[in-house]
Image (cartoon, rainbow, N blue to C red):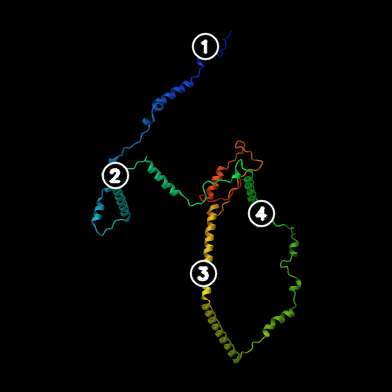
Amino acid sequence: MGKKAKGSRKGKKAWRANISTEDIDEYFEKTTKDALSGAAALPSLESDSLFYVDKSKDIPIKRKIEKKREKVLHYESILQRNPFVQVVPSSVSKKSKEKKRTEVLNENSKSNDVSKVDDPDSMHLDLWDEKDLAGEANAKARKRSTTSLIPAVEVEPPGCSFNPPFEAHQDSLARAVADEMQKIYKKELGPQPVPLTVPGEIVAEEDKYFLDADGENENDTEEDPEHASDDLAAPLKSKTKRVTRVKLNRRARHKEQLKTQAEAKKLENLSKEIDSLPDIMEEIAKEDEEKQRRHCRRVIARQERLKSAPPRLGKHKFEPAPVQVLLTEEISGSLRKLKGCCTLARDRFKSFEKRGLLVPRAKNSRR
């Protein structure tokens, strides 16, 4: 008889051998890492022992830097002795700026306290001082301020709410419908594009030879050669008549008369203009007033335009986003039943374009 085949042991020894110890190994690894890094003691420590404000000033390093700056090189000392060598303008400006800065600091320190002049700690600024931080933040905010008249976040009319009153919702809906109809009318009444193909019948190759290119009648082209020769000979037959001395004198007298009449008319017009000087002054004053009014109207119109649309930045015009108003069937009266839509990013992008922070781009239609 052969040996019995080895099967899976189901005794106590096999059960002990198949127990997984992964969670225990992970726990030991975590405890050893915490012990080495010191993270195990962090929850028990207080915040004062973990964090502190470093108020120490490294004065010796500052003194070393100042000594290095005050040190004059050998070639500079030689050049300073020579009266004909001028100092470089850039170095002059730097030195003058440093002198002015030190003078201002000395004056401030003298006005505050005489004893603080010799103290190097007075030169340092407290980084954690709330007043200094607030002043820096205000200065940055002033620099970032833009000249746009459009607010960063525009509040929509009450008719665009998720649960609007009936009259306000009807007004917003009518405005949205008017905008859409205006786009449709502009498209219909605008110039028609040039067609790519022209409707017509195809002309055969044989019929092309019988087409009239000029469109003239054969009767017009056919003329009698005799009449044509007579017309050409007519100007040749006409002889130039001789001008007599009497005609020349008459022409000269006529020219002089015209010249005297023109001068008399010019003098008459000049006298009339001199007499009508008050009227001319009134007309000039009226024209100036009209120009001033026109200029004021243009300025006001430009300001009103800047309130609704940005200035022209690129080749594309700014197109405002359509009014986000719900239809009558979509109004549920609850935010939970409101249909979700991703309009926040689009709204912010349009706001940047409207305020003139971004250049408007062409609308790309996805294929």
> Which one is earlier in the sequence, the residue at label 3 or at label 2?
2
> Which one is earlier in the sequence, the residue at label 3 or at label 1?
1
Q: CA distance from mark 2 to mark 4?
A: 75 Å
Percent position of residue 120, x then y: 28, 43
Query: In this figure, which residue is indicated by the disc labeled 2?
Result: 65
| Nearer to us: label 2 or label 1 | 2
Q: Nearer the viewer, residue 24 or 187?
A: 187
Disc assigned to residue 185: 4
| Nearer to us: label 3 or label 1 | 3
Q: Which type of secondary structure does the marked residue at label 3 adopt?
A: helix
Amino acid type for the residue under numbered disc 4: Tyr
Q: Nearer the viewer, residue 193 or 201?
A: 193
Contact (CB < 8 A) between labels 2 and 1?
no
Disc assigned to residue 12: 1
Residue 367: tell me if it is visible: no
| Nearer to us: label 4 or label 1 | 4
Amino acid type for the residue under numbered disc 3: Ala
Amino acid type for the residue under numbered disc 2: Ile
Query: In this figure, which residue is indicated by the disc labeled 3?
Result: 285
Residue found at x 48% / y 19%: 21
| Nearer to us: label 3 or label 2 | 3
Q: Residues within 10 Å of mark 2 (few under 14, many from 20)?
A: few
Contact (CB < 8 A) between labels 3 and 1?
no
Percent position of residue 179, x then y: 63, 50
Disc assigned to residue 47: none
Percent position of residue 196, x then y: 67, 55
Amino acid type for the residue under numbered disc 1: Lys
Q: CA distance from mark 2 to mark 1?
A: 78 Å
Compared with 287, 302 (above or below) is above
Q: Which type of secondary structure does the marked residue at label 4 adopt?
A: helix
Q: Which type of secondary structure does the marked residue at label 1 adopt?
A: helix
Percent position of residue 274, x then y: 51, 78
